[in-house]
Image: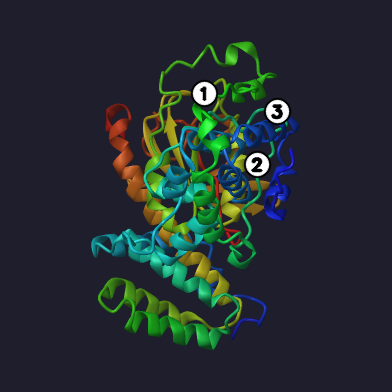
Amino acid sequence: MGFPLSDEATEQLSQWPPRARKLFDELLDDAGSDLQREFIQRAVAAAHSPAEVHAFADELRALSDEEAYEACTLHDEEPKDYTVSQLLQAEADPLFAFELMGGTIEPNEDDSSPGFVPPRPAPTLELEAQTPLDALATAVSKKKSSDSFEAESPGARPKKLDWNDLQHSKPAQAKKDPGPASTAGQRFLENLLAEATRGLSISWKEQDVDVPGGLSMADALSSAAGALARGIPVPCAVGPNPGDHRRFIVLMQLNTSGKSRAWQLYDPFSSELLWANEGDLLAKAELPFANKMNRRLTRIVLPQSLRSSF
Amino acid sequence: MAPAKSQPSTPFASRELNGEVLLEELSDLRNAQVPQKLLSDLVVGLRDLEGVRCSEASQRLKQLAANRFSATPALASLLVRWSAKLKVEPDVPLLIAHFERLAITAAIVASVRRAAESLKGGGR
């Protein structure tokens, strides 16, 4: 792979597992043009997960350079109420711009797969260090007359490595048994939250707790603690059993005293704001809310792409 | 007695700053129908206060309230109230973080309310 990578992309890639890095090389090889490769590496530099980058690359592959440029560029003459923050982030992060322009990706991801290390928060935007979009526009215009580009059929290129291969070491039954309630895979909050917090540069990922392919309760709480430490409350679903989501609550704060940790839970529907010992959450037997039927966390929605200051 | 310079002042040291206090403010803003976009804009504006001295931060909060958010009395009065509580330098980043949490929590609660219909029994 001879495509030059930015320092930010290289740093993010250094945290990816070897198989994800290999897939990244494949994505660059498969990309139909330098413009697409530039977009892909920028998405990596912006700390998107390997699965998000893969899904983004898949979307790009089906587009011509002109279409890709249009899909990943916010235009000043059509502000559409974009905030300055959005405009700046979109310039550095084509995946963010793609979604802001209405594009959707469907990452087939499972960050809990062995060896996966979540990307670190993206560095604060340093636009001077970025390739100016004018240069990308030039690349687009050059590509218009490129025979090799016209000869490419990006969508038809076979993938050499499927993303699912990265989950090779999971137990075989993990994918076959979706759990008692068939809501696995149904995303209740992810898109709503992404839309609502777009101006704050946060994206989200829903993950079931204690169902095959999901997070363990301990891992879910560990991830939530990291988010709260960065000042981001964490929405969750609660219910009587794993996979049976009955109500949403919010993890507001985490308080540590010696070896014990207490979580502040907020139920926006009953307006209850309560503290619970971590041991009670891990025991999955009862939550301190008045409604005792919902005794455990069943799903967690974790923030993904963050400003470095969070 | 004034707090030591390296310690935040009392309102910012409270365990409930980002718990009860935040939710009360959120309730007020919701009742006043303050749009989420304004909260996000406020957060972006407040990030400029990072590293700014306490007295200047207080001044700029009042300016934001009087100019950018004058058409939103609930938000403007919240800014003015907090500007008066800034006493020492460590208060400034805590206040910025508080407003960031406020904006994020507002977005979460609004999203959760919309998504609740998808759950069994309406999620309520």
Query: What residue is shown with label 1?
Result: A156
Quick one: A262 or B44, which is closer to the camera? B44
Q: Measured from the top left, where is residue A305 in percent x and y? A: 55, 49
Q: Are marks 2 and 1 in contact (CB under 8 Å)?
A: no
Q: Measured from the top left, where is residue A178 in percent x and y? A: 49, 16
* Mark 2 closeness class: few <14, some 14–19, many ≥20 residues within 10 Å: some
Q: Are marks 2 and 3 on the same chain?
A: yes
- Give me the C-alpha separation between circle 2 and circle 3: 11 Å
Q: Quadrant of residue A246?
A: top left
Query: What residue is shown with label 2?
Result: A118
Q: Chain of mark 3?
A: A
* Mark 3 closeness class: few <14, some 14–19, many ≥20 residues within 10 Å: few
Q: Is residue A232 left or right of residue A197?
A: right
Q: Name the kind of residue labelled 1 in the image.
A: Ala
The residue under the point 32% across, 77% down is B77
Q: Measured from the top left, where is residue B9 in percent x and y? A: 56, 77
* Mark 1 closeness class: few <14, some 14–19, many ≥20 residues within 10 Å: few
On-image quarter of the C terminus of chain A: bottom right
Q: Are marks 1 and 3 in contact (CB under 8 Å)?
A: no
Q: Is residue A110 left or right of residue A11?
A: left
Q: Measured from the top left, where is residue A49 in percent x and y? A: 59, 40
Q: Secondary structure at mark 3?
A: loop
Quick one: A303 or A77, which is closer to the camera? A77
Q: Are marks 1 and 3 on the same chain?
A: yes
The residue under the point 56% across, 30% down is A109
Q: Chain of mark 2?
A: A
The residue under the point 33% across, 38% down is B115
Residue depth check, mark 1 versus mark 3: number of the one nearer the observer = 1
Q: Secondary structure at mark 2?
A: loop
Q: Name the kind of residue labelled 2 in the image.
A: Pro
The residue under the point 45% across, 61% down is A87
